[in-house]
Amino acid sequence: MPEPHVFLTRPLSERVMRGARESLPAELRVHAGIDGPPSRESLLEGSRGASGIITMLTEKIDEEVLEAAGPQLRVVANVAVGFDNIDVEAAGRRGVIVTNTPGVLDEATADLTLALILSIARRVVEADRFVRTGRPWIWGPQSFVGLDLSAGATLGIVGLGRIGMATARRAHAFGMKLLATGRRATSQEAVRLGVEAVNLEQLLARSDAVSLHCPLTRETRHLIGAQELATMRKGSYLINTARGPLVDEESLADALESGHLAGAGLDVHEYEPQVNERLRRMEQVVVLPHIGSAGAATRDAMGTMAVKNVAEVLLGRPPLTAVAL
Ligand code: GLV
Ligand code: GLV
């Protein structure tokens, strides 16, 4: 039997790679492709005989991968806070620990959420595109008029957890009123920020902008569908920096096309990396390629955390951030 190794599905920053080589108690094998994630075959091949897998959210870690890895596999570390790409139950049945990277990307993701709120409310991307056409323009009292965040606009945060709270702090600083659902909606900090805890229906009916911050599970798939969009206020906005399948994109495109919704800011997509054709063509929609956590320090912290989780498990200690079953 060859010595078990740790398989890393994408090269990470130099800093993280150096740390990984120094701290992992096993040989590190890195998927060589720099252009993209491993193909399914390369993922299965790289996992074969591994004691640990450090994976990105683009890789589906299911029964087949766990089986291919073999019985010496002890830990799968996701370089992401969301872990819907991993079959946690199948891992649990095999005694394989699954870890994620909570906490370190809250601020970066909340920054990007505010960037999207501001971009669609103040029509930043649309106005930039206009200027780049080279058409003559002059200041106009009714040109590119959008929503004032500070004039009492209400932000509804669906799933007030760590990232939702970091978003709430920023929105509060911008003068927005806050509504929220989720486990921290009645916490001390929420109260201090003036958050009103409501149910989803009330949140949708009363918000000028709705921002999603819940994990993707069987229960939350299509949390926002035709009915929920119809419940939203006329002229309101939807922002999604969580997971694409939380939203039924075709229904969202309908709601935007009819003018019921005024805009959408989407960092994540239902069929990622495909972006919905209808949404992609709409001026009032900002589409980004899943960059919520893409700050240099944040990405280093995520990589370092994943490496530490693997090192701890292989050294026979509990990981820092195991995913609860
Ligand atoms: C990014 O989407 C993450 O879950 O960390
Ligand atoms: C805008 O530039 C203004 O001066 O009102």
Image: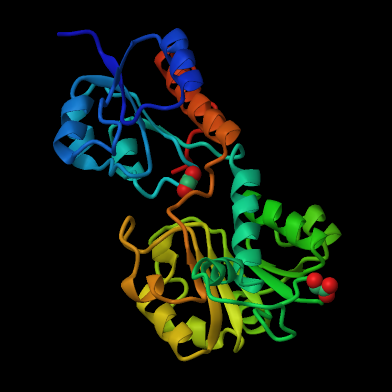
Residue 34 seen from this side: yes
Could you say which is closer to the camera, residue 125 or residue 34? 125
Instruction: In the rendered view, tell whether residue 280 sits above or below residue 19.
Output: below
- Considering every residue shown, the one lying at the far front of the view is 136
Q: Residue at x 47, y 24 (%)?
A: 309
Count of numbered labels shown in the rendering = 0
Q: Quadrant of residue 107?
A: top right
Q: At x 58% / y 84%, what residue is drawn?
A: 232
- Residue at horizontal 63 percent and vertical 62 percent from the top: 182
In which image quadrant can residue 36 be found?
Answer: top left
Regarding residue 219, the answer to whether it shows in the image is no
> In the visual, does 193 lie left or right of 297?
right
Image coordinates of residue 263 in percent, x first then y, are 54, 77
Residue 250 lies left or right of residue 193; in this view the side is left
| Residue found at x 59% / y 62% | 116
- In this view, the residue in front, 155 or 161, is 155
Of the pair 267 and 53, the residue shown nearer to us? 267
The front one of 77 and 289 is 289
- 170 shown above or below 228: above
Residue 144, percent from left and from top: 65, 79
Q: Position of residue 178 (x, y in %)?
A: 75, 69
Q: Residue 218 is drawn in which quadrant?
A: bottom left
The C terminus sits in image quarter: top left
Residue 51's place in the image compared with 273, above or below, is above
The colour scheme used here is: rainbow
Q: Quadrant of ligand 2?
A: bottom right
